[in-house]
């Protein structure tokens, strides 16, 4: 595996792979890699001949009061894991490489960037759209892989690729969970033992909505109430939102109908913020 930190070197390595007619995949990550990330790498490996993984904790998607400085980082371990997975290229730029001094042209995410996570994390999706566009521009992949774990991000990246005619296919991959249902996340490392024991309540809340939907409940407000009261059973959790939305537009569902719906949830537990989501199959 090659590890490269400069944009010019990455462009050159990928141009070489292109000359060999290879199908190229990009998996963008912020490092502190876990089985969720590695599932994206596996999916990429299956669909492409050349897999590039970026490891970059992007400062512009963190708000002032958020955990950029405290975000877990372990590049040596990440490189070991990626090497063992047969990744071809690890792109590990510094912030100075990614952002020229005074860089202030950004990608505006539009309405999808203002709801749910966007309503709580102002500017977050502008940072996400901008860095994803830059990574796509530098690597020029055929396929780019994103996890359903960050469902709003996946929907928004798909929309951005459509609206800006970016020449890449976005591939979504299912959320990888711990045995007790907790979605694996780099931020889980921050949880105390007590918080870790309480955290699976988010998945239980999503499942409570799913069970109601499968049982015939169509009123999104009833599903949202069920999620809310499930989370409230854990006093250490503070709910940010529990929402049932149209899976494509992220508009509130009202009544569940034939179109796919998605339950999304976000809560704070101590100093850690966790998000999760689940598809609502209503048959
Ligand atoms: P991050 O490093 O948190 O920015 O995540 C990088 C990519 O991995 C994103 O596309 C995430 O959605 C995806 N990802 C993170 N956690 C999981 C998980 N538990 N299952 C599947 N994909 C994940």
Image: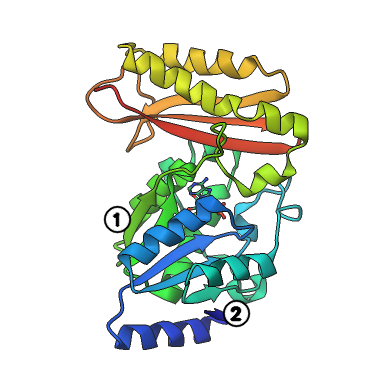
Count the marks.
Answer: 2
Question: Where is residue 255 drawn, in percent x and y?
Answer: 31, 16
The label shown at residue 162 is: 1
Badge 2, how many Cα within 10 Å: few under 14, some, many 20+?
A: some
Q: Is residue 113 visible?
A: no
Disc 2: which residue: 5
Residue 55, quarter of picture: bottom right
User: On the rendered image, what quadrant is the C terminus found in?
Assistant: top left
Q: Is residue 36 left or right of residue 220?
A: right
Ligand 1 neighbours mark 2 (CB distance < 8 Å): no
Residue depicted at x 75% and y 56%: 69
Q: Secondary structure at mark 2?
A: loop
Question: Could you say which is closer to the camera, residue 14 or residue 255?
Answer: 14
Residue depicted at x 25% and y 21%: 257
Residue 101, quarter of picture: bottom right
Q: Secondary structure at mark 1?
A: helix
């Amino acid at each position: 595996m090659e590890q490269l930190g400069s944009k010019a070197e990455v462009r050159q390595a990928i141009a070489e792979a292109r000359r060999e007619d290879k199908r190229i995949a990009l998996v963008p990550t912020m490092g502190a890699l876990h089985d969720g990330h590695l599932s994206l790498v596996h999916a990429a490996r299956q669909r492409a001949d050349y897999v590039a993984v970026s490891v970059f904790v992007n400062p512009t998607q963190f708000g002032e009061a958020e955990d950029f400085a405290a975000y877990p980082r372990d590049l040596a371990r990440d490189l070991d894991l990626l090497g063992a997975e047969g990744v071809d290229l690890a792109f590990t730029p510094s912030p100075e490489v990614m952002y020229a001094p005074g860089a202030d042209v950004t990608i505006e995410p539009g309405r999808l960037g203002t709801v749910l996570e966007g309503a709580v994390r102002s500017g977050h999706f502008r940072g996400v759209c901008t860095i994803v566009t830059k990574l796509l521009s530098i690597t020029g992949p055929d396929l780019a892989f994103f996890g359903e774990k960050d469902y709003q991000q996946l929907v928004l990246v798909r929309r951005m690729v459509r609206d800006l005619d970016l020449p890449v296919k976005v591939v979504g991959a299912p959320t990888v969970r711990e045995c007790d249902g907790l979605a694996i996340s780099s931020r889980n490392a921050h949880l105390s033992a007590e918080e870790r024991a309480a955290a699976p309540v988010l998945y239980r809340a999503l499942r409570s909505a799913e069970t109601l939907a499968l049982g015939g409940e169509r009123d999104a407000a009833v599903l949202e109430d069920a999620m809310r009261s499930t989370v409230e059973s854990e006093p250490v959790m503070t709910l940010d939102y529990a929402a049932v939305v149209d899976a494509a537009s992220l508009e509130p569902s009202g009544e569940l109908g034939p179109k796919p719906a998605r339950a999304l949830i976000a809560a704070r537990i101590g100093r850690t913020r966790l998000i999760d989501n689940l598809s609502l199959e209503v048959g």
